[in-house]
Image (spheres, coloured by chain):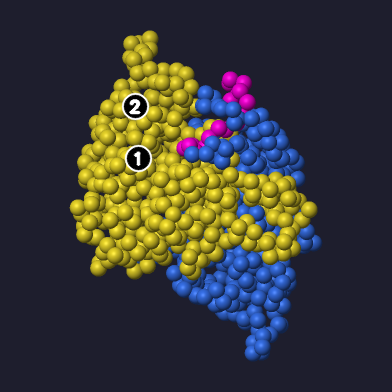
Chain colours: A yellow, B blue
Amino acid sequence: MTDQSTPEATSSNSARAATAPARTGSGEAGAGAGVSRRRLLGTAGATGLVLGAAGAGLGYTAAPAGATPLTALGADRAMFHGKHQPGITDALQARGHLIAFDLVPGAGRREAAALLRRWSATAERLMAGEPAPHDDTDVALDAGPSALTVTFGFGHSFFDRTDLSRQRPGALDPLPDFSSDRLDQARSNGDLWVQIGANDALVAFHALRALQKDAGGAARVRWQMNGFNRSPGATARPMTARNLMGQIDGTRNPKPADPDFDQRLFVPANGDPAWMANGSYVVVRRIRMLLDDWEKLSLTQQEDVIGRRKSDGAPLSGGSETTAMDLEKTGKDGTYVVPVNAHARITRPDQNGGAAMLRRPFSYHDGFDTDGTPDAGLLFICWQADPLRGFVPVQRKLDRGDALSAYVRHEASGLFAVPGGAAKGEYVGQRLLEG
Amino acid sequence: MTDQSTPEATSSNSARAATAPARTGSGEAGAGAGVSRRRLLGTAGATGLVLGAAGAGLGYTAAPAGATPLTALGADRAMFHGKHQPGITDALQARGHLIAFDLVPGAGRREAAALLRRWSATAERLMAGEPAPHDDTDVALDAGPSALTVTFGFGHSFFDRTDLSRQRPGALDPLPDFSSDRLDQARSNGDLWVQIGANDALVAFHALRALQKDAGGAARVRWQMNGFNRSPGATARPMTARNLMGQIDGTRNPKPADPDFDQRLFVPANGDPAWMANGSYVVVRRIRMLLDDWEKLSLTQQEDVIGRRKSDGAPLSGGSETTAMDLEKTGKDGTYVVPVNAHARITRPDQNGGAAMLRRPFSYHDGFDTDGTPDAGLLFICWQADPLRGFVPVQRKLDRGDALSAYVRHEASGLFAVPGGAAKGEYVGQRLLEG
């Protein structure tokens, strides 16, 4: 490829990549080297040429706009080691994979420990932009880490299969049934859960295959789902995510500046069980959006369903996206401006005993049904220190009277215990599996 | 969202977006205004604030790296009007949708003409970063055009349904059967074909839904497929695409500098039939990769199958990616260095009567089969002035003796006539439908 270098290849591209700051994942692991030597120097290093890109793929028609130097998108790196696992408080990524595995018959605690050790080693390398420890497929060969994160969790069934049921947190007790659920058990739950996110789809797929291969004879795929978010740089809006209904989603997420942010999200360091110190619980729901019905509503009807303006997420009671919602405000006709069954009213933390969860979703779209209905919606992923105080009370209220419920269908569900981040030399879940 | 602005929001973000050059599509439509006023000014314009992004989604842990100003990724704009339709010679995009429609019973030429008029109006607006002409879903509301392209084509069956069979090009005669084909007819062909590409997945989905709604009572979805490529900025490599086998793909694509580039790709302005002037023919194949088998091969075995080095795409006969392949070079044992059945040997244009096609694919991954096999591979999309001189002779040779054929399976196929680009005030296909 070096012979394709052109005068457009400038050292500033290289400098930009080299100075892209590493993100510190969700923990205190500190800034790393930013990007791996192999990934950034691998292709040009042999000849000592300056890195740079002259044209993207077939970008024939306008060289300047077609040029794609490695940007922060590619160079961005999350850290594997830290207090918490990555992929919880990191910025939303453009591409995501969720995979649940079941241990194969005969595999127990020992095989699970070996698997988590392999997975951790692979995740650490891939997140640094390095190839997998064995038999790399080369699919990510040219790319930077692209903000790759890999997150591991344990489902309720994991603990019986590994003779660790005494270590199973009560928080993993099955979620209550909700009347509006239409759950496909084959796509729900599972012994093990892996979340992959990256800003490049090939980097994400590369990780998916590497982790699947690591599972080898110990675990097999139970279900797998693909998702996406807006690409970094596609918008100048300080983004909360916009979903496939066109709504801004996540406005009321807890903020790191909130005094109780850590307390709501993470099991305390002296929490129970001890192996879950600094861990979190994740609820995963495949929520299909009935877009054909939703899109028939007028803008006003849609906004009444949600309780917020579609354009900017501001409450119907006025202000901007982050203005507190005035639930008591009434219109000329005496009715509430934010309707009583509006989604945003029902989900308000202060209406739910202070429940708060961090939602960090991906949208999904798996084509169309034969009648032209899109199989699309939200891979709802929410994080909390305690699902019985986070997801459950909110969903229970939604189940009773949410105006949005006519336009969504919960098709799959999972609940997983996500242990704290691994320290250097440790693998994720080690404190459980070798405790 | 304006109240989320922070000191990190700088006017340089705004300046960068505003100066991002417009691409000129594939034609001579000239540079446009770069990005639409609505998209760039829509959210901040009302308050007069400077555009800028403080944090991306949940980018809590490191504000500088989490910031996502609108970059060239979002601001990049392809032009709808031009000599050729967009989406043929434009840079590969990160996200793609392919959709085939069939006219509903009773719909004929008049309904088809009205549909193409609606589709053209929608495509023009969306590619400029504007909302759809009617009932916009707001899914792309905050995003720049993100290099969106929309491309329209006509299948063999279209012409009988619209009483235009005398206008059907001979080039649309069905492709010959290839012995290795395992085609699903329900996911093959179709009256109408639409290709959508963009560097943001929500922008692409937004276009998909808008165009599906435009089809209304005139046409219904026959099949639909999703694909992806590397994100711009994820790599500093002057990219040819890397596919899910880890191979560099597209090295031998014709280059705009080639003296016969236009001649190979596009029907001449005085071509036959006249309505196809400046048009092209596209062959679309869903090619599943048998990755479990492929990944069992050693690196040497994989490189022998392809005839090129996996790391950089250089021919096994030496040099770099763009070095001409030495087909006669032999090793110490007297055998060809590039094996006789190597994919790159068989597909060499000079081995195929000069046949050349422009391949502009997307990778796809639609999850796993129940046995854990990935449903993944390549949405092979190739462009040529004449399929009987482009795709067909090459595929015929591959069908006989390509070493790669053991690792791929052609699961669906389509052939479409893609008319030239629409002039201002014209819609795509007008010269056919009102000819």
- Amino acid carrying label 2: it is Arg
Indicate which disc residue A348 carries. Answer: 2
The answer to whether residue B81 is left or right of residue A219 is: right
* Residues shaded magenta: B43-60
The crowding category of the residue bearing disc 1, from other C-alpha atoms within 10 Å (few below 14, some 14 to 19, many at least 20), is many
Work out how far the residue at label 2 is from the one at label 1, CA to CA, in angstroms: 20 Å
Q: Are marks 2 and 1 on the same chain?
A: yes
**Residue A386, percent from left and from top:** 28, 39
Q: Helix or strand or loop: what does disc 1 sit on?
A: loop
- Amino acid carrying label 1: it is Phe
**Residue B321, percent from left and from top:** 69, 67
Determine if the magenta segment contains residue A82. no
Q: Is residue B362 above or below residue A179?
A: below
Which residue appears at 29% of the width and 33% of the height? A394
Residues B129 and A54: in front is A54
Which residue appears at 45% of the width and 32% of the height? A248
Q: Helix or strand or loop: what does disc 2 sit on?
A: loop
The secondary structure that most of the magenta stretch takes on is: loop
Mark 1 lies on residue: A266
Q: Do callouts 2 and 1 mark residues in contact (Cβ within 8 Å)?
A: no
Q: Is residue A308 above or below residue A131?
A: above
The crowding category of the residue bearing disc 2, from other C-alpha atoms within 10 Å (few below 14, some 14 to 19, many at least 20), is some
Q: Residue furthest left?
A: A166
Which residue appears at 22% of the width and 56% of the height? A164
Q: Could you tell me which chain the residue with mark 2 belongs to?
A: A
| Labels 2, 1: front one | 1
The answer to whether residue A140 is left or right of residue A348 is: right
Q: Is residue B110 visible?
A: no
User: Which of disc 1 and disc 2 is earlier in sequence?
Assistant: 1
Dividing the picture into quadrants, the one containing residue B371 is bottom left
